[in-house]
Image (cartoon, grey):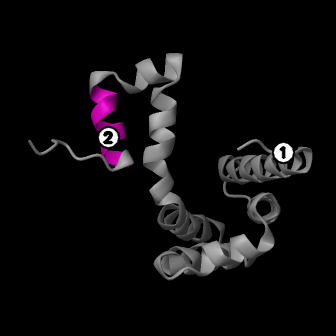
Amino acid sequence: MWLSDTQSMYLGLTAFGCALIGLGVVLFFDAGLIAIGNILFLAGMSMIIGVQKTLYFFTRRDKLRGSIAFFAGFCLVLIKWSIVGILVEAFGFLNLFGDFFPVAINFLRSLPVIGRFLSLPGIRQVVDRVGGYPSQYPV
């Protein structure tokens, strides 16, 4: 699936939102940067996949707990409780996008330099646990 020019522009908007969230965390949980980053992330994501599909994604029954936590964390950031808000948002983010982690890890393992790094003995066990892989496969 290739992105059109407008979708790639919105992907940049989403990436800029993630960068602002990260910068807000690095700068001692600056609530303003985190709030602007959240708005840009949500706006970019809804423009990439469409508003209707975004609403469907956030209101699915199996994603409801993650959606509530994500938006509760967003509201906490808006009222300047940035540390608690970002922790609640992270919990919601993991519940919303946790199914995507094994796919992302498999993609990263196929890259030349990062794949070798992720295959190192100590790191491989940690990545497998984060990715949700079983420690031993049944015979």
Q: Residue at x 51, y 31 (%)?
A: 108
Residue where numbered disc 1 is placed: 8
The structure residue drawn at horizontal position 51% and vertical position 16%, both measured from the top left corner, is 113
| Left or right of residue 137: residue 125 | right
Residue beneath the point at 51% across and 75% down: 63
Task: Point out residue 61 in the picture as x, y percentages from the top left corner.
Answer: 50, 83
Residue placed farthest to the front in the image?
A: 1
N-terminal-most mark, 1 or 2: 1
- Say if mark 1 contacts mark 2, CB within 8 Å: no
Q: What distance separates the C-alpha of mark 1 from that of mark 2?
A: 31 Å
Secondary structure beneath dot 1 equals helix
Quarter of the C terminus within the rendering: top left
Q: Position of residue 25 (x, y in %)?
A: 66, 52
Q: Secondary structure at mark 2?
A: helix
Q: Which residues are magenta?
A: 122-130
| Type of the residue with mark 1 | Ser
Q: Is residue 107 magenta?
A: no
The quadrant of the rendering that contains the N terminus is top right
Figure check: 22 above or below 86: above
Label 1 crowd (10 A; few <14 / some 14-19 / many >=20)? some
Q: Which residue is mark 2?
A: 128
Circle 2: residue type: Asp
In the image, is residue 128 part of the stretch drawn in magenta? yes
Q: Is residue 19 left or right of residue 108?
A: right
**Horizontally, is 45 left or right of 81 in the view?**
right
- Given residues 85 and 46, the one toward you in this image is 46
Q: Nearer the viewer, residue 9 or 117?
A: 9
Q: Is residue 29 visible?
A: yes
Query: Which mark is in front, 1 or 2?
Result: 1
The picture places residue 49, in percent across and down from the top left corner, at 75, 61
Residue 129 image-quadrant placement: top left
* Number of residues whose C-alpha sits closer than 10 Å to that of mark 2, classed few (under 14), some (14–19) or many (20 or more): some
